Image (tube, rainbow, N blue to C red):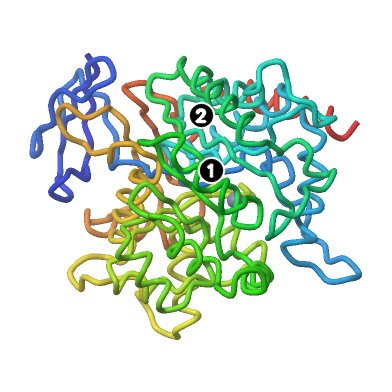
Amino acid sequence: MTRLWFRAALLPGGWSERVRVEIEGHRITTVQAGVASEASDEVHGFGLPGLPNLHSHAFQRAMAGRTERRGWAGDNFWSWRTHMYALAQAITPPDLEAIAALAYAEMLEGGFVRVAEFHYVHHDRDGAPFANPAEMAVSLVAAAAATGIGLTLLPVYYANAGFGGLAPSTDQRRFIHDLDSYAQLLEASGRALAGLEDGRLGVAPHSLRAVTPEALDSLTRLQPDGPIHIHIAEQTQEIEDCLAWSGLRPLAWLMQNQPVDERWCLVHATHAEAGELALIASSAAVVGLCPITEANLGDGVFPGADFLALNGRFGIGSDSNVLIDAAHELRLLEYGQRLLRRERNVLSSLADQGTADQIYAAAGVGGAQALGAPVDTLSPGAAATFISLDDRDPSLLGSSPDEIIGRWVFAARRPVVDCVWRRGRKVVSGGRHLARSAIVARYQDALGRLRA
Ligand SMILES: [Zn+2]
């Protein structure tokens, strides 16, 4: 049995001080508040559930910070995508495992405990399928196992280069399936996940531009209990192309043509209009917001305040993994809204609770729904999955419990996540993943191969 003692911990009913948590195997057995620490306790600062990361393309971690230079013809999402495709064409299964291990270790160090991997580089470099159609997914599963992060694997269906069933381009050759080969991929992905304790499987039609309506109908029936994720309304170009194709904007088209419900995660939804926001909110689908990537790519700002006023559900994702940090994502989410509306504390609906506390809790619940996973809580019987923050960091010194998350999100200069436990296993200590040195060495080797 492991006995941990926290100066304060966020329990299901709110923050409590002097909390002992006992763990046996992968579960929490006991939680006691208001108790003194004992000699056999491992003493920590502030304990709380970590967050789910609802949208990641792990391989893109290898191009982080490398596209920050303006080309002669301007720069936008589409010019960035050209760089990204070059990387996607080069990586091998061992490269992917090494890059994903670094991304997943950084997620754990940054406060994420589970990730939804929106995985679309499936085939070998020449576009031919591997003998195991889920060969690349096997690498992602190995990275998740090595780092300890929880994985919801979302094999992506990608068939078309644009609306109206446009044929794919050669630089998309590693992504492409028809419905039969996708069904095989899904089955092989399920086998790949079998080695993980709590892996989950969903489906991911890449975007409305990459699938036909007929394919979308089939895809959403393939994994009846699993999550369905789709990129949508991220780019203004996509809105214009969808209007030209169907007369409807992408979100309006999707809400009219699919039974969107709580299984769905609408990734980005940046350019949502008022009527579309109302449809999404009433569908109980989760909007997958990726504020750092959306800022980095110049996508736009999701109308978050309007959506929350409709009780809309959301979670956060690190998407391109240009910078991996849960607190940064929440900070930028709120700051984007402040800049838009020239107000403060915009994503707050409760005056007696901090803004960061509210969006942290909402992203925990929305993220878990999107990942098809239970909401992590510090309570008896729950999986022992939680994080601790360093109460000796200057940004958290002297913090009362109701200030902790606000100080972390808005005022910490460096990551203050101290330790992370996943299903009873400590995977981060002193802010570093326990296998960090070996993971970085393998990542360095992969970069060397990719640049050779
Ligand atoms: Zn994405």
Which element carries disc 1, helix, strand or loop? strand
Is 177 in front, or is 322?
177
Looking at the picture, does residue 236 appear above or below residue 330? below
**Other-residue count near label 1 (Cα within 10 Å), few / some / many at <14 / 14–19 / ≥20:** many
**In the figure, residue 199 lies in which quadrant?**
top left
Dots 2, 1 in contact, CB < 8 A: no
Is 367 in front, or is 265?
265
Percent position (x, y) of residue 53? 46, 44
What label does residue 376 carry, if any?
A: none
Which element carries disc 2, helix, strand or loop? strand
- Mark 2 residue type: His
Q: Quadrant of the N terminus?
A: top left
Would the CB of label 1 be found within 8 Å of ligand 1?
Answer: no
Is 333 in front, or is 54?
54
**Which residue is disc 2 drawn over?**
433
Q: Is residue 234 left or right of residue 397?
A: right
In percent of the image, x 31 and y 56: which residue is there?
A: 362
Structural distance between the alpha carbons of marks 2 and 1? 29 Å
Q: Quadrant of the C terminus?
A: top right
Percent position (x, y) of residue 29? 15, 23
Looking at the picture, does residue 248 appear above or below residue 178? below
In percent of the image, x 22 and y 45: which residue is there?
A: 10
In percent of the image, x 75 and y 66: which residue is there?
A: 76
**Which residue is disc 1 drawn over?**
204
Q: Is residue 129 left or right of residue 429?
A: right
